[in-house]
Image (cartoon, grey):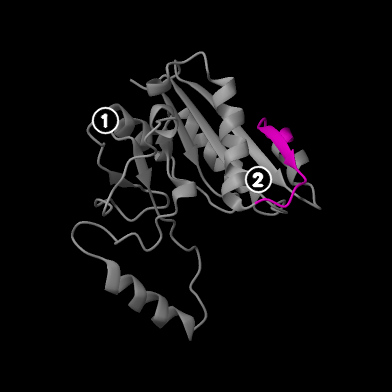
Amino acid sequence: MITSVGVLIPARDEGTDLPACLRALAVALRELPPELERRVCVVADRCRDDTAELARGAGAEVLVNTRDLTIGATRALGARHLLRGLDHHASARTLLLSTDADTVVDRDWAVRHVRRADAGWDAVAGTAKLNARLAATAQPRYEALLATVRSPAGHGNVYCRSGRAPITRSAASSRSGPPRTTTCGAASPTPDSGWPMPRRRR
């Protein structure tokens, strides 16, 4: 059973969108059982605006990165920070979640991921719905791309980004690496809804 949840959010000059992200995240985390420890870390990545101050004001832990890092390395900073703060929990009982600063998660976002972890999933990759239509010339191409990769088993990984994949601490720290998967499973089309990855048999 999961006993702790860490949420990391990389943010570069996201002062406009971050408050809505953190408000929605706070609602989602309140839906978790009260005994679950939860921590939120915003990695302010070379920001020139008030991203860090807004995150602190919302109660998030803030790491300030001033180096030119890839987004993966930036996320890794936040993940390491969260894992250090949650290291009094067994690794198999810690779930790391990740979302973007311009994303608004659903109320049951965290609950759904915890349920999957409790059911034995090591990792979940997901998508986010756009909150506005693309330009008239781009929308048909976007819909055509999605249509070519959708199947009854899932969306074919077109938007599975490993950086946004919730993952158990034990899977993240496994010597053999994170779980391998050839396809994502089916899930409802909601923001960060999750595409389950089968647990690798050890």
Q: What's drawn in magenta, residue-wise?
A: 56-69
Horizontally, residue 158 falls left or right of residue 87, namely left
Amino acid tagged 1: Gly
Q: Of marks 2 and 1, which one's residue comes earlier in the chain? A: 2
* Numbered label attached to residue 79: none
Q: Secondary structure at mark 2?
A: helix
Q: CA distance from mark 2 to mark 1?
A: 33 Å
Q: Quadrant of the N terminus?
A: top left
* Numbered label attached to residue 19: 2
Work out whether 95 lies above or below 100. above
Amino acid tagged 2: Pro
Q: Quadrant of the C terminus?
A: top left
Spot the residue most to the right. 48
Residue 83: give x, y in percent of width and height: 54, 26
For label 1, the residue is: 120
Residue plotted at (35% across, 47% down): 194
Q: Is residue 66 magenta?
A: yes
Q: Quadrant of residue 90?
A: top left
Residue 122: give x, y in percent of width and height: 33, 35
Label 1 crowd bin: few (<14), some (14–19), many (20+), radius 10 Å: some
Horizontally, residue 84 falls left or right of residue 43, namely left
Spot the residue most to the left. 152
Depth check, front residue: 106 or 13: 13
Residue plotted at (37% across, 63% down): 158
Work out whether 119 lies above or below 99. above
Depth check, front residue: 137 or 79: 79
Residue 29: give x, y in percent of width and height: 49, 31
Q: Is residue 135 magenta?
A: no
Is label 2 in contact with label 1 (beta carbons under 8 Å)? no
Q: Secondary structure at mark 1?
A: loop
Residue plotted at (39% across, 38% down): 177
Work out whether 172 lies above or below 194. above
